[in-house]
Amino acid sequence: MKKLNFLLIGCGRISKNHVAAAAENAGLMELVAVCDLIEERAQEKAASLQEKTGKRPAVYTDYKKALEELEIDCCSIATESGYHAEIALDCLRRGKHVLVEKPMALSTHDAQLMIQEANSRGLKLGVCHQNRFNAPVQELHRAMEDNRFGKLVNGTARILWNRSMPYYEQAPWRGTWEQDGGTLMNQCIHNIDLLQWNLGGEPETIMAMTGNYLRDIAAEDFGAILIRFKNGAIGMVEGTACVYPKNLEETLSIFGETGAAVIGGLAVNRVETWNFSQPAEQDERVAALAGTDPTDVYGHGHNSLYADYIRAIQTGTQPLVSGTEGIKALKIILAAYKSQKTGQAVRFDDLEFSTLDMNDSDVRYHSEEAAQ
Ligand SMILES: NC(=O)c1ccc[n+]([C@@H]2O[C@H](COP(=O)([O-])OP(=O)(O)OC[C@H]3O[C@@H](n4cnc5c(N)ncnc54)[C@H](O)[C@@H]3O)[C@@H](O)[C@H]2O)c1
């Protein structure tokens, strides 16, 4: 099959995973161009890809120019979150498939528009929730699909990480309502996606309390969410950017009538509990997965995510994390924001909300000393 030509838009912190995925999937795709408003960053990624594959992609500072000059099949978008929707819609309207970093957008309206635009044009929209491809997570999901948990009761997504002020200062868009959101939207969205994916998918009601305790940003640095799913199961989220002094764990737990699974470690990659009433042939394989942790918290899932996304384009199927899947975690977080703002439980189905709706809500719980 013909290799697909990709353009990477945004060459900041996460772009190295996109470049690595392009090199890893060189038999399926070619990253023909990289683009950043800051040329030096794009040059750096071009050099990095050349080192890995021997081929140097073209460098652009204007993605529209790249789309006019080159034959591009797919655009990977890794800019600040607040630009995802605008750039994705522009690329889709130019007939390009789009793979967008998380969160796919910052409002329900924009995310729905992106899904509609892709569907109406027969284009594939993918969202980078790469942790779905972690080997233990894939095994857990299979166990859920095979009904090994029996009746699902509860599950937890714990994200106990540390993001210090230099992390926010390095890229001032982080922690703003216009471009990002807080730790729930930026760091916790992956595990929230895994929680909903493995605990029944369709949320009914969401209640949350969030707050900003330690970091000098507009949005929350801690959030607690309760999710009642339509199947009755209850999901809980404990997400923080404030753990002293460094990242502690990202853990997903799923509990049912006949099964209990806990996948933890630094980034949901280490099997900690794997108990089922009925043994299955894959349990030995799962036991062998215990103890592996990625070298950084982003893991290595982008490689598999790209391969899956390309396969979807080639075969006319949907990628594992399509726009329709990507919007679910986004909506849970926006519902949590609305719940914090209103003090009420929020119905998932009717939700229309944007991070911008939080602009007038003060979530600060700083001590007077810390605020000075
Ligand atoms: N999947 C993951 O695990 C993961 C991890 C980290 C970040 N992210 C997401 O990736 C995105 C980028 O995060 P980051 O930390 O790399 O940000 P960053 O600030 O390091 O990089 C963003 C880059 O995009 C560039 N940019 C902005 N507008 C552009 C445009 N119109 N054309 C070309 N380039 C443009 C900026 O100049 C900047 O270099 C965010 O949405 C973030 O949430 C995902």
Image (cartoon, rainbow, N blue to C red):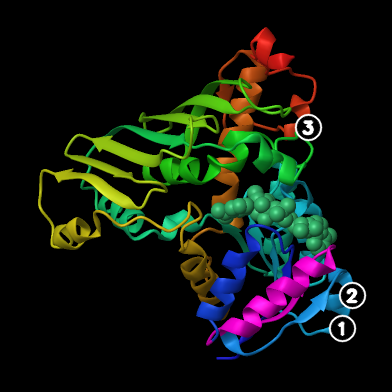
Q: Magenta region: which residues?
A: 27-52
Estimate how packed mark 3 is, as few (under 14), some (14 to 19) or many (20 or more) residues with alpha carbons within 10 Å. Answer: some
Residue 278 appears in view: yes
How many angstroms separate mark 2 from mark 3 (CA)? 30 Å
Q: Earlier in the sequence, mark 3 or mark 1?
A: 1
Taking depth in this image into account, of 367 and 91 the one nearest to the observer is: 367
Q: Residue 329's spot in the image, x, y percent?
A: 55, 42
Estimate how packed mark 2 is, as few (under 14), some (14 to 19) or many (20 or more) residues with alpha carbons within 10 Å. Answer: few
Q: Which mark is residue 69?
A: 1
Q: Residue 328's spot in the image, x, y percent?
A: 55, 43
Q: Earlier in the sequence, mark 2 or mark 3?
A: 2
Estimate how packed mark 1 is, as few (under 14), some (14 to 19) or many (20 or more) residues with alpha carbons within 10 Å. Answer: few
- Which residue in the protein does label 2 denote? 65
How many angstroms separate mark 1 from mark 2 (CA)? 6 Å
Could you tell whether 79 is left or right of 367 in the image?
Answer: right
Q: Secondary structure at mark 2?
A: helix
Q: Amino acid at mark 1?
A: Glu
